[in-house]
Amino acid sequence: MASLIVRVLLILACGFAALSASVAAALGLEEERILAFTGVVALLLLLPFLPRPRLCRPSGAAILLALLAVGLVLADLGGRFDPLDARIVLPVLVLLAGPNLARFLPPPELARFAWRLLSVYVTLTFLYQVLAEPAVVARGYESVVRYDPTGSVVMHSSLSLVHLLLAVTRLGQPLRPRQRLATIALGGMSLSMVFLTATRTAALTLAVFALLHVATSGRPSRALAQVAAGCFGLALAFSLWTILFSDSFFLRLIGAQGDYSSGRWASIGHWLSLAGDHPWGLGLGAVRELLAGGRPALDGTALLEWPHNELVRFYVEAGPPGLLFVVLLLAVAVRRAVRVAREDIDPVQRTLALAIAADLVAEAFLQNLLNAVYHATVLFLLLTLATSPERADASAMPLAEPAPGR
């Protein structure tokens, strides 16, 4: 029963992650979304202590992260504190308490659960994208048109790419003919949606994933051959896509739209200049507040953007402690993924851990990962479960059916 409840709560949490901020605002559900998501995560993290209390000792790095997060929030209480800024604690709580969930959903089962859940997401979003009016899912400018059925191209690209990597891994395993055909079809859907989002963050995610895959493989030469084959296949698919369907992703990759950074370098320079006058930060949420009244022009034409880099944003808002917080958070995520990937585990579980870790790194460097706290918290939760050393607890699992004749 508890195992079923965990799965239902995980589905709900992932549903919140798949609901973009723009869609929530359009539906007037912003506050309700925050409260409901926080409640679901709290239930997930508390559930292991209800039927049979047993605590997995958190790592020293996770404890340090928790102290840093609490310190950042407390330091902001005397200033412009907004309760929204405390949401940075959610991913840390997941890292601390998440491993206790593994006795209800151990890593191998979590990998299968994540594959099925992401497959449902990919199927539904792909069908909606095909059936909806193009103008409804189009997000474009100048000669670049990007398509996204969720309202967040970054989040949609992230989930589609993780699913794609799982599909490729599954194709390397023994499958029934129907399963293989279904996996190919699902992988094709996720690949097409990654191309349609034209999000360059996906390229960095793939690069980091390839690096981690080779670094953690027991047979580096074989891993390098796999990466080379994957690069060739992806380049071929991308070339055909660009020629036959859309060149938007290609144009973004070569910077044909003008400023290759889309205004980010100028904005990062501006934010760092502000931080120079405030060595201990402007306060959590300062970037959001400064842009709340509109985006000022930097040089008469280019408009100020979010930093689109969490290391820069947390340094601007919280100084050196903020920068340390983000670096340590990413280090913990990558370390957990690398540690479990070096073990003899299910290949899909291994790919899930490495893909999420790579995505977290890419989004932290090219996006504002922790500003999309729903998406980030779910990714950290899946990573924590996929890398947990815990095994299934008999008290948490359904009773096995008795053997015939007994």
Image (cartoon, grey):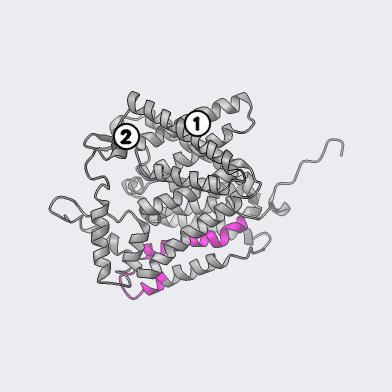
Seen as rendered, the residue at the extreme right is: 405
Residue shown at 19%/52% (left/top)?
A: 303
Classify the position of the C terminus by image quarter: top right
Seen as rendered, the residue at the extreme bottom is: 78
Residue 369 position within the rendered picture, expressed as x and y whole percent measured from the top left:
39, 54
Q: How many marks?
A: 2
Q: Amino acid at mark 1?
A: Leu
Q: Secondary structure at mark 1?
A: helix
Q: Nearer the viewer, residue 309 or 210?
A: 210
> For this view, does 114 lie left or right of residue 80?
right
What residue is pinned by disc 1?
A: 186
Would residue 24 be visible to someone looking at this image? yes
Q: Which residues are magenta?
A: 72-101
Quarter of the image for residue 34 reads bottom left
Q: Is residue 357 above or below residue 245?
A: below
Q: Amino acid at mark 2?
A: Phe
Q: Residues within 10 Å of mark 2 (few under 14, many from 20)?
A: some
Quarter of the image for residue 158 reads top left
Seen as rendered, the residue at the extreme front is: 221
Residue shown at 44%/32% (left/top)?
A: 234
Q: Is residue 90 above or below residue 139?
A: below
Residue shown at 35%/41% (left/top)?
A: 199
User: Do residues under tags 1 and 2 come within 8 Å of each other at their CB atoms?
Assistant: no
> For this view, does 14 lie left or right of residue 76?
right
Q: Nearer the viewer, mark 1 or mark 2?
A: 2
Residue 250: mark in rendering: 2
Counting residues from the start of the chain, the first of labels 1 and 2 encountered is: 1
Residue 204 position within the rendered picture, expressed as x and y whole percent measured from the top left:
40, 45
Mark 1 → mark 2, Cα distance in angstroms: 23 Å
Residue 49 position within the rendered picture, expressed as x and y whole percent measured from the top left:
63, 62
Residue 364: mark in rendering: none
Secondary structure mainly formed by the magenta segment:
helix
